[in-house]
Image: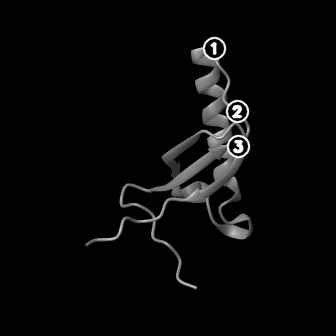
């Protein structure tokens, strides 16, 4: 199976769906955080950490993450 290439700037994009039904797209995760035996699982931990920081600064915590998947590339027409 072909491996997706990281973005040129060293990030991989992920779409995140939360348990409350909200979604965020194109969340950047450093490519260095991914790979090895855990594959994309470290991306979830990285995004959860970002969400905690955002929640602390805004005073409104984010819902728990339901799913996280790599963003699909848009197809050229």
Q: Secondary structure at mark 1?
A: loop
Residues at marks 2 and 3, CA–CA distance in whole angstroms: 6 Å
Q: Disc 2, disc 1: CB below 8 Å?
A: no
| Residue 7 sits above or below residue 25 on the image | below
Q: Disc 2, disc 3: CB below 8 Å?
A: yes
First in residue order: circle 3 vs circle 1: 1
Q: Which residue is mark 2?
A: 63
Residues at marks 3 and 1, CA–CA distance in whole angstroms: 18 Å
Residue drawn 60% across and 48% down?
A: 16
Query: Is 41 or 64 nearer to us in this picture?
Result: 64
Classed neighbour count for the residue bearing mark 2: other residues with Cα under 10 Å, few (<14), some (14–19), many (≥20): some
Residues at marks 2 and 1, CA–CA distance in whole angstroms: 13 Å
Q: Secondary structure at mark 3?
A: strand
Left or right, 26 with reference to 63: left
Quadrant of the rendering where the N terminus is positioned: bottom right
Residue farthest to the front?
21
Query: Is 56 or 21 nearer to us in this picture?
Result: 21
Q: Which residue is mark 1?
A: 59
Left or right, 6 with reference to 20: left
| Residue 10 sits above or below residue 57 on the image | below
State the image coordinates of residue 56 (x, y, percent, origin top left). 64, 18
Classed neighbour count for the residue bearing mark 1: other residues with Cα under 10 Å, few (<14), some (14–19), many (≥20): few
State the image coordinates of residue 59 (x, y, percent, origin top left). 63, 14
Q: Name which quarter of the figure residue 46 lies in.
A: top right
Quadrant of the rendering where the C terminus is positioned: bottom left
Residue drawn 58% across and 17% down?
A: 57
Residue drawn 53% across and 83% down?
A: 2
Q: Which residue is mark 3?
A: 65
Left or right, 14 with reference to 17: left
Query: Is 42 or 17 nearer to us in this picture?
Result: 17
């Amino acid at each position: 199976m072909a491996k997706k290439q990281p973005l040129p700037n060293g990030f991989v994009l992920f779409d995140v769906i939360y348990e409350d039904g909200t979604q965020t797209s194109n969340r950047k995760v450093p490519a260095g955080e991914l790979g090895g035996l855990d594959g994309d699982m470290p991306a979830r931990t990285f995004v959860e950490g970002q969400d905690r920081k955002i929640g602390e600064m805004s005073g409104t915590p984010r819902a728990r993450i339901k799913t996280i998947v790599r963003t699909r590339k848009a197809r050229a027409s």
